[in-house]
Amino acid sequence: MIKNLWVFDFDGTLSCIVPDRHAALLHPLCRTMLAQLAATESFYTAILSSRTLDDLLTRIDIQGIALGGNGGAEWLLPDGTRTPLSQDRLTSLQTVRTLLLSELKHIDQIEGVDIEDKKLSIAVDVRQVSGKYRRFIQRHLEFLKLNYNLTIYPGPEAYELVLLPDMLKTQGLMNLCGCIGFNMDEGFLQYAGD
């Protein structure tokens, strides 16, 4: 039975926030810490990110760590077990995702905007956007939130549009606990991130 569960976000927790999110790297000191946690028999270590699982796989190469992508909707466990979102739910997302990507074309034309389709969410990165356009982007996203019943997480430099309202990192963490048989009432859970 797992008694100690350590879970970390990636961006801004294990990696520095960088101007280009594609350039984000695991910080060397965090790599050392994760390797030590993964090697400790009484600890179970996981990374839970809004990035896709495939994206995380290119950034984390430490054995013995569970990786959760899309807010924990899909997991890759240390034993190689992959727990993807059901095909039914993925199919139901296609319509709303297509509509939203079409709606986001209004702001995608603004210099500096970077839109990333993550299947279960859409990230709107505004790091490179000048101040005069940021308010317009915020108003447009508020309009989409109301019209599509979205959950939107604003960050200092990006917005995360969650396409499945019940698929938040909290639910993703619960998914992991169910997969590995971790009971929060009987064990120690440490989470670092947003």
Image: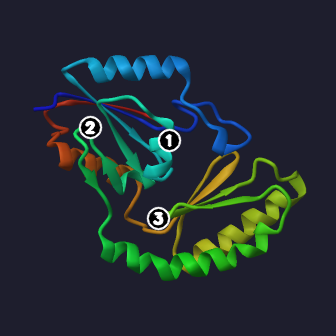
Q: Position of residue 73 (x, y in %)?
A: 36, 57
Between circles 2 and 3, the one closer to the viewer is: 2
- The residue at 16%/37% (across/down) is 185
Between circles 1 and 3, the one closer to the viewer is: 1
- Ranked by sequence position, the earlier of labels 1 and 3 is 1
Farthest residue toward the left?
Answer: 1
52 relative to 185, above or below:
below
- The residue at 75%/53% (across/down) is 126
Q: Which residue is mark 1?
A: 58
- Ranked by sequence position, the earlier of labels 2 and 3 is 2
**Amino acid under disc 1:** Thr
Quadrant occupied by the N terminus: top left
- The residue at 39%/23% (across/down) is 34
- Ranked by sequence position, the earlier of labels 2 and 1 is 1
3 relative to 133, above or below:
above
**Amino acid under disc 2:** Pro
The alpha-carbon separation of the residues under discs 2 and 3 comes to 23 Å
Q: Position of residue 122 (x, y in %)?
A: 57, 63
Q: Label 2, secondary structure: give it.
A: loop
Which quadrant of the figure has residue 23? top right
On the picture, is 108 further left or further right than 1? right
Q: Which residue is mark 3?
A: 120
On the picture, is 53 further left or further right than 110? left
Q: Which residue is mark 2?
A: 78
